[in-house]
Every structure is written in structure tokens, then in C-alpha cells.
Image (cartoon, rainbow, N blue to C red):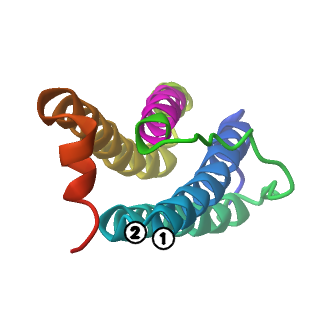
Amino acid sequence: MKAKEGVVEFLNQILKSELTAVHQYLLHAALCKNWGYERLHEHFSHLAQEEVSHSSGLIGHILYLDGTPDVAHLDQVGAGRTVKDLFKADLEFEREDVESLRKAIVHCAKVGDFTTRHLMEDMAVDSEEHVDWFETQLRTIDQVGLDRYLAEQIKK
């Protein structure tokens, strides 16, 4: 099937973001494991796998639309020296992802590509859930303190 105007470009932009997220969450999982935060390690590993799934779906959809997936480029991977730094970087990243997805959704509706729009809407729901999770973690840290929060992250 031939893609409508601009759709593959939006899909490749979102693919770049999803592939970056895979790397960022793998790094954050490894950092948390190294720091001894088993629960956070597992959560970040789960997020990385979710982003792999999104990336795979995007690649398949781009190919379906007779496009060429751009897997050679990444955005800058956000890191940090503390768990709170990781959460802040990830929150910002996910907020930007939601905004990109919203723009793609509007474009797809405008050009009449409802299949791609539906795919983007599903991904937007996941990204909004990620935003909520990171906001909740940061709010919890503010409420109970970093030391208490981290003490709960050591074991499952």
C-alpha cells in the first residue's frame, strides 16, 4: 500500500524516538541494577521491551506503506547520576514523545490514513501512562523523601 503524503516521515520520526527510548531505558535499567535497585531495574527493563515492541510495529507499518524504515539514527540518550535525574529525563522524553504522537495523529487524520492514526493513538496511550508513572514517582519522592523511596526499590 502506498503511504499518504508525509506519513512515512512522521513514522520515521517516531521510530527514531522509540529506538532512542529502547537505549535510554536499557541504560537506566543497567544503572538501577548497578545501584542495587532491583524493582526499578525490572521496571526499566519492562519499559525497554515495550519500546522494542513499538519499534517493531513501526518498522512493519512503514514497510507495509512501501516506505523505508530509518533505523540508523537516534536522538541523544538521557542519563543521570541519580534515580531522580533518570526520572526527570524520562519524564521529559515521554512528554516530547506524546507531543510528537499527537502531531502525527492530527496529520494522519488530515490526510485520511486512519490505520496509521489508530497505531499512533495506541502508542500515545502507552506514552501517557509512562508520563503518569514518572510524575507519580517524582511526587512520591517529594512526599516521602528520596531515602525512603529508594529503600522500597531494593527488592521486589
Check whether the beta carbons of the residues at disc 2 and disc 1 lie within 8 A of each other.
yes
Say which of 17 and 11 sits in front: 17
- Could you say whether the residue bearing mark 1 is in a helix, strand or loop? helix
Say which of 113 and 48 sits in front: 48
Q: Quadrant of the N terminus?
A: bottom right
The crowding category of the residue bearing disc 1, from other C-alpha atoms within 10 Å (few below 14, some 14 to 19, many at least 20), is some
Location of residue 109 with respect to 50 vertically, above or below: above
- Could you say whether the residue bearing mark 2 is in a helix, strand or loop? helix
Determine which of the numbered discs, if any, sits on residue 49 in the image: 1
Residue receiving disc 2:
46
Q: How many marks?
A: 2
Q: Residue furthest left?
A: 143
Q: Is residue 98 magenta?
A: yes
Stretch of the chain drawn in magenta: 86-100
| Amino acid type of the residue that numbered disc 2 sits on in the rendered structure | His
Q: Residue furthest right?
A: 72
Q: Quadrant of the C terminus?
A: bottom left
The spot of residue 88 in percent (x, y) is 44, 31
| Image point (28%, 51%), residue name | 150
| Amino acid type of the residue that numbered disc 1 sits on in the rendered structure | Gln
Of helix, strand and loop, which mostly describes the magenta segment? helix
Determine which of the numbered discs, if any, sits on residue 33 in the image: none
The crowding category of the residue bearing disc 2, from other C-alpha atoms within 10 Å (few below 14, some 14 to 19, many at least 20), is some
Does residue 104 appear left or right of residue 150 in this picture?
right
Say which of 86 and 68 sits in front: 86
The spot of residue 90 in percent (x, y) is 48, 39
Does residue 43 appear left or right of residue 3 in this picture?
left
